[in-house]
Amino acid sequence: MKTYSKLLDHNIIQIDTGYLRPGLAACYLIIDNNRAAVIDTGVEQTCDRVQAVLADQGLTFNNVDFIIPTHVHLDHAGGAGKLMQLCRNAQLVIHPFGSRHMIDPARLIAGAEAVYGKQGLRDSVGEIIPVDENRVIEADDMYRFRLGERELLVLDTPGHARHHFCVWDEQSRGFFTGDTFGIAYPELDCDGHSFIFPPTTPVQFDPPAWHASIDRMMAWHPERMYLTHFGQLDEPVIYLNTLHRMIDDLAALALEHDAPELVLAPAVKQYIYQELKKHGCQLDNDRLAEVLDLDLDIIVQGLEVWLERR
Ligand SMILES: [Zn+2]
């Protein structure tokens, strides 16, 4: 195994995408009867890692049947076009609301350049390449497909983004959750318990839809979740109430600060740090800043957009 990859049970391999810092974003390789699927793609540089991990398994890009970004945010789908170019037999499975951005990424790129700057985007995500529309499967809710002998199913899960789905794997009884089941960085684990929080990323944060999506996933009685940020989460039912509560808490906090003279960012930071303390986290503030500053920024931006659009 490569240092950036981890063999999980059920022929699933977790790969650190290399996006921004180690441990920030993962993608997953599922293998069945020598056929492979990649769930979330990371960024351009992730392609080399996928190739190396495939080679570890005696496989090449030609064994990849499906490339499946959970949604079109660039830490999940930035490398999808490049990976599609390299995996000649693969089809892209994507939410119907995300497909046009994969086929013509101009708007994705423009949006990301506004946030990262042109050079910043190149450095962090790399080149974003369009996907041939003849190779795109728009996967509606409950779309089922087969990888080797294995059945995968797509569940429409709005709340973090309207173009988000999660992928159910019957064999592992697990969901590949993208961002829908929150973020849980291993650095923040305490006594084997994960610290979970919902990324209220711009521009489609939708609390009621998110609650419904989480409950819908739980109705499948999943035994584990595969989080993009970051890794396998066992016994998801333990985290259910926290996730629901934090979606509501963050929305409430935003509403309390819905006035020009009030600043939301410090309140969000204080709230998350308080939750971390309750959780038993012992990391000092410098270390917490390294792990969380980027997400705190995105959470605040997303809440502000949500307030404006309500
Ligand atoms: Zn996202």
Image (spheres, rainbow, N blue to C red):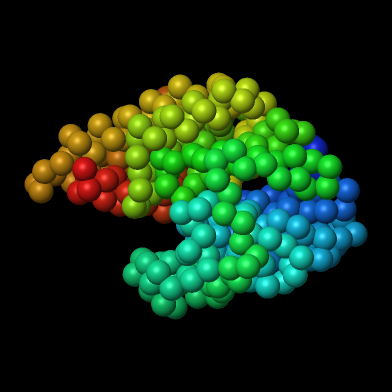
- Asked if 266 appears above or below 93 in the picture, the reply is above
Q: 3 or 241, which lies in front?
A: 241
Q: Residue furthest bottom?
A: 119
Query: Picture coordinates of residue 25 (x, y %)?
Result: 57, 52
Q: Is residue 263 left or right of residue 72?
A: left
- Asked if 90 appears above or below 232 in the picture, the reply is below
Which residue sits at x=77%, y=34%?
A: 171
Question: How many numbered discs sit on the rendered protein?
Answer: 0
Which residue sits at x=90%, y=59%?
A: 58
Query: Picture coordinates of residue 140 (x, y %)?
Result: 55, 45
Q: Is residue 235 left or right of residue 141?
A: right
Q: 22 or 72, which lies in front?
A: 72
Q: Is residue 132 left or right of residue 284?
A: right
On-image quarter of the C terminus: top left
Q: 72 or 58, which lies in front?
A: 72
Q: Is residue 75 visible?
A: no
Q: Is residue 58 visible?
A: yes
Query: Picture coordinates of residue 159 (x, y %)?
Result: 41, 40
Which residue sits at x=55%, y=30%?
A: 217
Q: 7 or 305, which lies in front?
A: 305
Quadrant in which residue 242 is drawn: top left
